[in-house]
Image (tube, coloured by chain):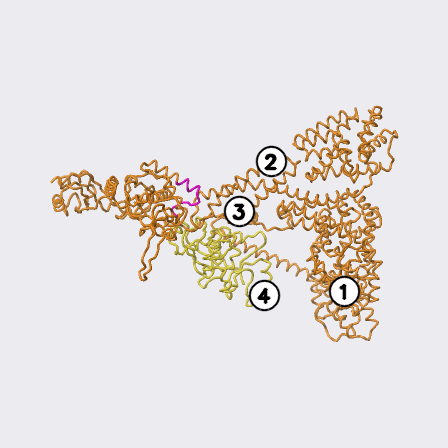
Chain colours: A yellow, B orange
Amino acid sequence: MRPLTEEETRVMFEKIAKYIGENLQLLVDRPDGTYCFRLHNDRVYYVSEMILKLAANISGEKLVSLGTCFGKFTKTHKFRLHVTALDYLAPYAKYKVWIKPGAEQSFLYGNHVLKSGLGRITENTSQYQGVVVYSMADIPLGFGVAAKSTQDCRKVDPMAIVVFHQADIGEYVRHEETLT
Amino acid sequence: MKANREMKRLFVGGLGQGISETDLQNQFSRFGEVSNVEIITRKDDQGNSQKVFAYVNIKITEADLKKCMSVLNKTKWKGGTLQIQLAKESFLHRLAQEREEAKAKKENPTSVNTNLVEKMGGVDFHMKAVPGTEVPGHKNWVVSKFGRVLPVLHLKNQHKHKIMKYDPSKYCHNLKKISEDLTETIPITDLTWELEGGNDPMSKKRRGEFSDFHFPPQKIKKVQKGPMESKVSNISLRTNEVMESNKSTQPTTVHRKAPSTAVPSKSLHVPSSGTQKPKHMVFHTSDFEIIWNKSRMSDDDIDSEEELKVMIAKEENLQKTRHSLVNESENDPFEVVRDDFKSDTHRLRSSTSSGNDSDCDSSDTDKIIAMKKNTVKVKNSAESSQPEKSISMRSSFKKIKPSNDCVEVQNTKSNKESALGHEGKFLNPKFPPDSNTSDSEESEEDEEYKALMKNCPRVNLTLADLECLAGSHQKVPGNDESDGSQNSSHCKFNTTSKSPKTSNDLHSGRQCICPEEIVASLLEEENTYSRQKTEETTLKPKFQAFKGIGGLYAKESGDKTLKETVDFNNINEQSRSSLKHEEPDRVFIENGSKCTNGSSNKLTSCQPAKKVNNPNHIQSPKRQSTSESQSHKVVSFTCFDKESQNPLSCPLPLKGKKSLSAKSHKIESDRDTCHQPKSRKASEKEDTDSSNITSLEKPPKVSFREDPQKSTASFSLSVSDASCMSAKDKHAEDNQKRLAALAVWQKAREVQKKLVHNALANLDAHPENKKTHIVFASDNESETEETSTQEQNSPGKELVTESVGKASGKLFDSSDDEDSDSKEDSTRFNIKPQFEGRAGQKLMDLQSHFGNDERFRMDSRFLESDSEEEQQKELNEIQTNEDELAAERKQTLNVVQSVLNINLSNPTSKGAVAVKKFKDIVHYDPTKHDHAIYERKQEDNEKESKVKRKKKREEAEKLPEVSQDMYHNITTDLKEIFQHTKNTDEKEEDTPWNEDCGREETEEVSVAATLTSGAEHTSGFTFSFFDSDTKDIKEDTYRTEPVKRGKIVYQEDPRFQDSSSEEEEEEVTKEADHKRPSPGEAFPVECTRFFFFSENDDRLHGRSILPFSGVEQVVVQLLLIVYSTQLHLQVLTHCSLMCFIPLHYKAFRGQ
């Protein structure tokens, strides 16, 4: 367990900023306590100071996880967001996509969102913008990347992919063993 | 020759750059009559011309054409190799031709199409009828969907020999274009227009500046169809274009291809793909029907541009008003929302809720007559703004609803925003109404309370009373959440349901069914009051633990476990019996408040207990009244006394219980369930009692033990207060007693502690010879372990066991008190004083090396002196740790800055920024002071009202004592007055008062008495026609009521006041018609109000602030002036005024 290097921090923040934009600073500088990011087993954890202190008592190899896992660094040192970060990112999300009830399941099985399943989208969403996917009942379902801008979404045919799947809450079931 | 001349269109390619139309004209005029030359220059991205070619319209004969081609083709001319081909006719030309033809056809209508139309009886294919209705007069012709008349087809199935009936009204995809009618169309020149745009290639292409010949596919979408369809598509396309070209509609000469059919398909097929193939109309949505109808309505010639513009404007209006919004992406099944999108359902709910609020507010306003003017105004504005808001909301909502079908356009958004703005506007007036509702609720509570009080005469203020009080208390706060109207009904229902019960339930066994509730309510009350009293704030958490039945039950179970441990320690057999006794107890509590059946023995046991208790209750009120009178003296203590008054009913049974305790433990169990407060003294006594009883092995001991557990130290305070109250009347003595009781209790605690210490010391002393091994644990644990082992292992040492048993018995008896027990528990884990602090920790470490071996006791001498340094070091460590974290945060913030490319302000101010940003999502922290704004004010009001209510009830119940000096204070004004007019008044005074008093009897008597007695005291002449007893009593009312008037009624609870005062006034006007049952309760107040105010009477001020608004206030002021001037003239006028004011007041109220 160690703090992130600056490079790692930058990579991760760039990724997170795709989803929440400048709200990122609210994650870093929280009014309700000190929170920090910690790298452990290539995974980045978002930990409160208190838990951090507690976790310091546990040796590195025994420690499975602490705080909330935001994602992990791949071998190529890219950052991959995990669905566990959804709870922290969804409230701050700048661009949202609501998907129709029929398409919910498909998304939760890890599929991309087609235009036919697109219920609602934030205007001015640009292409490849990170979005948080909601159900029509405003329940955050996961992360995605806009495959088309909002304008393009209007034109494409219904079977075209409009949101690329990134992470969804179905992973809690599907990838239980890797989500820590 | 001439006849053969035909209009040809020639393509002339490979022209040079500098060619002109006249050149071409001259060149080609050799072969024929050139009518039009069009040179087209194709340029690349840089603007260099790549190709130049031309179209030449020429009237030429076949022979000449051939000649021309052979002569000019592939010849070099003006820097280019000519290439001449026969071009296709200009589509506009052809269109014009076709139209001409169509026109000609129309003039002599013989076509099949028109025949068909005629066959339909002149109704041009459309009927406004429900789909499926048969066309009258034509068999097998039905109105299909969207009003088109179609024949029912009978088709033979391919493989089977069945004839299928095809009813077009049941299908959608059955519309097929048969032919076109070109007669009624837009003039060709209007079909094209220019597109504005920048210099980018896209807009260039849009404008028709292409690098190759193809027209953009969008342009090809141009539609030529039957009248209806063409119009539809025209309009829609037109609007599309309008949208694209920034709402500039300037038709110019960009050419379009004419003939194809557009399909405004609503299905999931995209329009672009639909336009290419479509030969059938797919009408799904009502949206299109609407457009269609619209276009039908304006079915006349749309030739002129103006008309078209009008059409467009209409269409735009339609867009605005209708939910179907024709946009370029009209068929998109999803909607686009803004960044700050919030789900509509929430908005709707909030709006409806606000509407409800204002609704119930309006109903409230009916009741609240004397109200602050501005609040009323605000409310009115709220009400007025509500309808329009709702309308806007509705409209906007309509638009949002069909979001599945169409995309929201800017219009809707703006509408939505306006709606939101409405809502926001509405939010402001929402708040005062809320407070109003709370007010009204309070007043309702008050009314309820009063009804309650009326129903139960104060003599029987028993558990039943308390119970229903508790019920109402618990219910009313619960109802606060719900609608106001509902609330009122609920409250009323409560009162009606409860009030009869109060009288009935007095002796029923049900009283003891929900004592938990009573306790809970009592504790709640105490909780509320504890805020007002700073001394009680410390006790608050404890009470909160008590709150609710669930908590009680949890506590009960906790007690049970505690008791079990006690029993474990006590090896006596009685533990079993106590457990047994516990069982029904628990069952009883489990059954909760609702179990009427409960356990049968419980009920039976409760009833006798009640019977025993009741006499006590009947005795109590007297004391209560006295205590209340005392409590009235000190305002700060009133609430406290109130509380104590409620529990009063229990200490009294306690007394009876004490006497009965030997007899039946069931009574005690009853008391257990009540958990009612005990006086400290009583508990002390009981402690001793219980110790006796334990020696006797009596079951009641359990209950005894439990009771002190229940009565927390803090609670005992009020309890002791109550008991003291019952014992003596004086407040000072109360305090003294309380303090004394506290002291006694503390002493007892000391004694207990000593006992514990001794016992532990004894235990410590023993192990020395016994111990064979070192226990690696903390001291305390080992000690207890040792005690247990000792107890088990040494049966022979009976003396020791007994002492231990006694000690433990004493220990746990005395520590029965729950929190004391818990304290005991907690103290066990407390760090011993010698082991406190950093040094102590080291010492303990040292000590732990040797275990509990007495030979190696460590003390501070063994400590090394480097502790301070280490301390410093550790502090530094912590400091560095924090520094590290801060540095890390700084770093991450820097990264954030670099990532986001924004300049973050200094981190300290960022907290504020965050808070500002998430204003609607605030993590509420009750410990923070500034978060008090998020608390609902209602609670305070409620509390206040409770206090007021209590006070009111108090005053209604009793006739408190009045000190003489107060009395003098009132009459000082009169003193001078009467000194002035003493001589005249003497006689005049008598007559009117006699008159009045003769009619009004007791009420007026009181007034007269006070007046006259005032005169007596001030002027010194002894004159009275009433005996002193009555005077005293009546004076009481005078003294007390003004306080009530000025503070409670007028300011806090105007509605209630209004009703009551109205009553009173009515009574005044009716005067002696009926006597009221409680003399001197309300009426004298009225008298005082109008009788005893001087010019700057604070009572008057207090009144003028609130209930008298506007005119009324003026009237009162007037009366006041009149009053002060006339006061010394005649008392008679007073009397007349007294009758006069209420009348007028009432009249104004009626307005």
C-alpha span from label 3 to label 2: 26 Å
The amino acid beneath tag 1 is His
Disc sitting over residue B581 in the figure? 1
- Sequence-wise, which precedes: disc 3 or disc 1? 3
Q: Which residues are magenta?
A: B315-329
Q: Cα distance, mark 1 to mark 4?
A: 49 Å
Q: Position of residue A117 (x, y in %)?
A: 43, 55
Mark 3 surroundings: few (<14), some (14-19) or many (≥20) residues within 10 A: some
Q: Secondary structure at mark 3?
A: helix
Image side of residue A118 versus residue B1028, left or right: left
Disc 3 and disc 1 in contact, CB within 8 angstroms: no
Q: Chain of mark 1?
A: B
Q: Is residue B672 above or below residue B1009?
A: below
Q: How far is the residue under mark 1 from the one under mark 2? A: 64 Å
Q: Of the residues under marks 1 and 2, which one precedes in the sequence?
A: 2
Question: Label 3 is placed on what type of residue?
Answer: Leu
CA gap between label 3 and label 4 equals: 51 Å
Q: CA distance from mark 3 to mark 1?
A: 57 Å
Which residue position holds label 3? B348
Q: Which of labels 3 and 4 is toward the front?
A: 3
Which circle marks residue B33 in the picture? none
Q: Report the residue marked by disc 4.
A: A58
Q: Where does label 2 land, which residue? A: B377
Q: Quadrant of residue A64?
A: bottom right
Marks 3/4 same chain: no
- Which residue is nearer to you in this view: B1064 or B539? B1064
Residue B321, magenta (yes or no): yes
- Residue at disc 4, secondary structure: loop
| Callout 2 and callout 4 share a chain | no
